[in-house]
Amino acid sequence: MLVVSPSLSHLPARRSWRLESLGTWLSLGVLLLWDASGLDLRFARYWGDAGGFAWREHWLTAGVLHEGGRALAWVVVALLVVNVVRPLWRLQSRRERVWWLAVTLACVALIALLKRASTTSCPWDLTEFGGVARHLSHWRLGVADGGGGHCFPSGHASAAFAFLGGYFALRRAYPRQARAWLAGVLLAGALFGGAQLARGAHFPSHTLWTAWICWAVTWLAWGVSTGPARPDVTRALTDARRRLPDWLRPQASQPLTQAWLAALWMGLLANWPLWLKLHGMAEVRPLFIVAFAGMVTAATGAVLSVLAWPRLIRGVLPVLLLASGALAHFIGSYGIVFDAAMVTNLLQTDWHETRDLLSWRLLLSVALLGGLPSWWLLRRPAAPPQALRRQLAHNVAAFALAVVVMAVLALGVFADLSSTMRNDKTLRYRVTPLNAVYSLGSAALRAQAGPVGPPAVIGADAHLLPRAPGAKPPLLLLVVGETARAMNFSLNGYARPTNPALARLPVVSLRDVTSCGTATAASLPCMFSPLGREAFGAQKQPQENLLDVLQRAGLAVLWLDNQSGCKGLCDRVPNAFTRQLPAGAVPLPAGLCDGDECQDEALLHELDRRVAALDPMRLQRGLVLVMHQMGSHGPAYFKRSPPDLKPFQPECRSNALQQCAREAVVNGYDNSIVSTDRLLAHAVSWLQTQRGFDPGLLYVSDHGESLGENGLYLHGMPYAFAPREQTHVPMVLWLPEQGDLAASLKPGCLGGLRDRPTSHDQLFHTVMGWVGARADVYQPARDLLAGCRA
């Protein structure tokens, strides 16, 4: 238990309120003078030059004061949560404990929102320090400086200054501890701000503004809710409420009231990424944003009015509120949208991929936007029972009123509404939580509508073409990449050497390949289908895939997975995860795996033993070996490359990509591409040892990735308006020059495929042609190698 002091504050509340008020306004004036002085650049120049900032990745500033300080802040938040439930300071009232936690979270959220909306870039982004941005005052609101933006005010400093509420929460019962707490918070804030200044992450003004904003919010919140101004505020609110007519004074325990309070909360606050998106669109007027916010709130209220029944609403609202907090985080942090395909992708995501998406910011968003209102709602007493007819009449009236409000607002801004929705078709996917509920329902209906039972048989007549006398059976190593984008392959003209190993091999890299989808759940099954993207999306009944046809033709087939699984593709053929070693295998080398997650090099471990375990009769006819990579799966790109293979530094070592400089995000991603490059080169070396086969390698990624272009991260955008970064994927072919297949092709023909437009639609037929398999579903026109055969 903490040491306590029973003494009371030595200053009357109103006197301290006046002194703090004076100090607050004086400090604001000093801060404005600092902004006008131009001292920010002088301080930054002391720590950095044209080569950057020497302390940017130093263990003290980046490790202890940045990463360690952030971890310490969340430990303190956890203690404040404990303090609400089980007091650590016994003389504190419950109001003070709850207020302390709430105002701390509010400060963190406010600084994060201001930073998210800011166009001001960090010092390390400026051209003077080796970046690309020009220096502009943070008062140039909405004016882009050419850098990544989102750097004002200082988010890291809020890891200290957000706790200023402890001074107010403690000083009634523990004045000495309150003053010590204040001194400690100010010292920690100065250390965190100084570390970020030395690293080039922030100017001094960024830290000072964070300190003032957190102080002002905390001081005002204390005065209004707990301090000397509370009686006046309470009296004013009570008088105002008494003047309202009865129908405008609903009881908070009534289900319809709770439904509309939740609609206001989710419609206005949980949709903050949508409002920031609209604010950043030059053609959008503020009046339209206000009207659209009203439409979203009214639509949410209309849906909840239908559900506003005593037992139902108390179960539905917490789920929607918590989901809204999570959705707001992912949409605001990564720019992703939720449609039925994204829902399917999420449902098929395994624990390892989910773990990479977890963060303290996600927890904060869920707690603040979901947990806080849910806690308040669940504490309301149960509503007195009402007649069924009366409750139904109220719900119908509320629903009708919401529809009328939506219609009036839509008609009032119809020209803006139609043009805005036409110019950016992703906006409707950002409406929280209505769009997510709709998408979840669509995905569920789509799953239920499908036929039950095994997939339809395709290629029932599958067979192998006769081999020439003396020809060896084919061995095709098909490597399915993850989240690789073609524009980051140096084989395709990327300026950075991301393919140093493949560049020394006689490979052919196809530069204009389009994916089947923008997420693994959609793209992977489509890649292995003979139908092509458009027909695959319209099919009514699931079908077998490439692996089934190859196995039916008599070939040995093996699927090795280092990711979340094969999405059902390998269910009917031999398959294994990298950690599932064959009998008698040597254990995986130390350092190759971290917990349950392995580097892609593990796919090559004991590969000869895995092949030897297959049906020998099938091996005599040939082998198709599929490797499913972890590849460049985000957002934790830094995990996708081993410690000895990180040529590009500094590297973003966080899953909160928006908090890293874009250069660091790209560095981490490019390091993962270098890791894939080494895997493919080692795979070629293994293939060259397979003397009894005619070997070959085909690599293709399932989809691409956004790395912050236009505010988008990760992948999964609806295909109709997905950016090219998410659909432009690499494809690499390797054949030994003395091999049987290479000898059957026209000289130089493969090289002519480099700039030919290609897509995943051709993968099924190219593999069939490569290994000499034929069936009624094989289409020579879609076989990349068909035109090259002599």
Image (cartoon, rainbow, N blue to C red):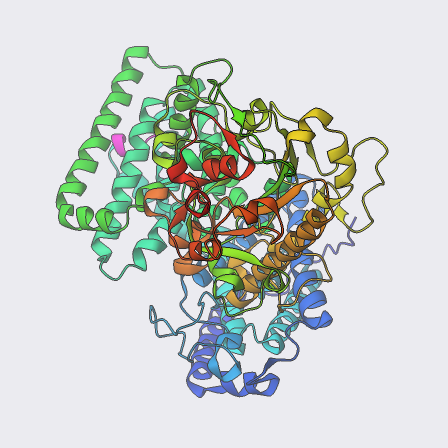
Q: Is residue 702 left or right of residue 1?
A: left
Give whichever of 101, 624 is nearer the camera.
624
Quarter of the image where one finds residue 280: bottom left
Residue 619, x across and y down, in percent? 69, 30
User: Residue pushed farthest front?
Assistant: 469
Q: With respect to residue 35, does 297 lie above or below?
A: above
Q: How many marks?
A: 0
Q: Can residue 383 be spotted in the picture?
A: no
Q: Which residue is painted at 67% across and 64% down in the image?
A: 646
Q: Which segment did they paint magenta? A: 246-251
Quarter of the image where one finds residue 641: bottom right
Give whichever of 137, 703 is nearer the camera.
703
Q: Can residue 537 be spotted in the picture?
A: yes
Give whichever of 123, 764 is nearer the camera.
764
Q: With respect to residue 384, does 592 lie above or below?
A: below
Give whichever of 487, 140 is nearer the camera.
487
Residue 790, x across and y down, in percent? 46, 46
Residue 659, x across and y down, in percent? 54, 61
Q: Is residue 331 magenta?
A: no
Residue 543, x across and y down, in percent? 46, 22
Quarter of the image where one finds residue 584: top right
Q: With respect to residue 59, does 759 lie above or below?
A: above
